[in-house]
Amino acid sequence: MTVFPLDNEQDPVRRDIIAAINRLLAGTPHRSNGRLNVTQLAIEADVKRWHLTHQHTDLKDRFQAEAAQAEAKWTKAVQAGDAHEGLKREHAELRQYCRHLESRLEVYATALNQLALEHAALSGRDADAAKVRTLPRRRQPLP
């Protein structure tokens, strides 16, 4: 965060305002609730709001510009966090779907293996062919 220098300021009110700006932008308020608006800046600087809106408009404008940048950064961070949560949720759903497909694959592999054994037994390529009986075929439905 940009820190406003106090070096060139002789006016004690301006020095108080700049110190309050620096505290608010750093996230360490002493008197206010820490929101980045002009009212909270006036409370933090312990000055009347009209000092900011009528006498020290340059400081008010600089503060509002910095507050807008801080708000944009915060919004971008929140959106990135939301996107990350969405990706984590989607990842969990895909993993669950993958587990479901793997269990189906096991069932199909077992069925195919059983069918292959029965085919081998029925075609006479297996010594255990006598143990397998063929089922009667279904009749074809009439058109």
Image: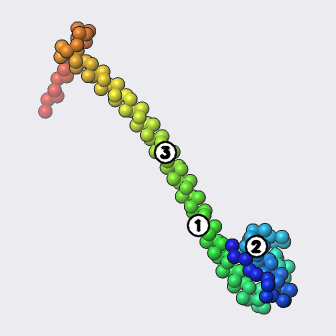
- Residue positioned 82% across, 83% down in the render: 15
Specify few, some or many for label 1: CA neighbours under 10 Å numbering under 14, 14-19, or 20 or more.
few
Q: Position of residue 131 (x, y in %)?
A: 26, 9
Which numbered disc flags the more N-terminal residue, 2 or 1? Answer: 2
Work out which residue is located at the far left of the displayed protein and give it.
Answer: 143
- The residue carrying mark 2 is 24
Residue 12 to residue 126: above or below: below
Q: Nearer the viewer, mark 2 or mark 3?
A: 2
Q: Nearer the viewer, residue 90 or 62?
A: 62
- The residue carrying mark 1 is 76
Instruction: Work out which quarter of the rendered image holds the C terminus and state it.
Output: top left
Residue 129 to residue 31: above or below: above
- Residue positioned 43% across, 40% down in the render: 98
Which corner quadrant of the image does residue 84 belong to?
bottom right
Q: Position of residue 116 (x, y in %)?
A: 26, 22
Q: What residue type is labelled 3?
A: Glu
Q: What residue type is labelled 1?
A: Lys
Q: Is residue 135 visible to us here? A: no
